[in-house]
Image (spheres, rainbow, N blue to C red):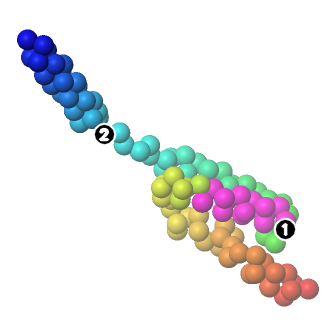
Amino acid sequence: MRSLWTRMALSTALAGGLLLAVGAPASADRDWGKSCHERLEADRARIDKDAARFGEGSRQVDRDVQRMDDNRKWCRNHKADWDHGRFDVGIYFRHGQEDKKEERKENR
């Protein structure tokens, strides 16, 4: 009789474990696309405002573009895509520190 109770307890534990492991709903990752777009749109507006006020080569615009680059990294890390044709062109996209140094030398 004791053997029967032991087998029933083990069977119940095994069934419960399988139910918890297999029966859990698959959770999808959150869609960060909207947040990414909002961040980049705010950066774009800030860059446009500072470019109109201080000029495209100003340190304010450089700071804003760096912030936009940081937000692009955030989007990549959260696997959110953005409109590359809107945010990765012209003044909104700089190619690292070496390009900035060359631009400064040419402007002297």
Determine whether, in the image, residue 9 is placed left or right of residue 64.
left
* Label 1 crowd (10 A; few <14 / some 14-19 / many >=20): few
Give residue 58's mark: 1
Which stretch did the figure color magenta?
A: 59-73
User: Is residue 37 visible to the viewer in this orientation of the structure?
Assistant: no
Q: Quadrant of the N terminus?
A: top left
Distance in Å between CA atoms under marks 1 and 2 = 49 Å
The outermost residue toward the bottom is 106
Q: Which residue is under mark 2?
A: 26
Q: Quadrant of residue 86?
A: bottom right
Q: Amino acid at mark 1?
A: Ser
Residue 25, compared with residue 10, is above or below; it is below
Q: Earlier in the sequence, mark 1 or mark 2?
A: 2
Q: Quadrant of the C terminus?
A: bottom right
57, 36: nearer the viewer: 36
> Could you say whether the residue bearing mark 2 is in a helix, strand or loop?
loop
Q: Quadrant of residue 49?
A: bottom right
Determine whether, in the image, residue 39 is placed left or right of residue 16.
right
Give residue 31's mark: none
The outermost residue toward the right is 108
Which residue appears at 27% of the width and 35% of the height?
21
Determine whether, in the image, residue 59 is placed left or right of residue 97.
right
Query: Is disc 1 in contact with disc 2, using a CB cutoff of under 8 Å?
Result: no
Q: Is residue 51 magenta?
A: no
Q: Quadrant of residue 89?
A: bottom right
* Label 2 crowd (10 A; few <14 / some 14-19 / many >=20): few
Determine whether, in the image, residue 85 is placed left or right of residue 40.
left
Which residue appears at 78% of the width and 61% of the height?
63
Residue 55, compared with residue 21, is above or below; it is below
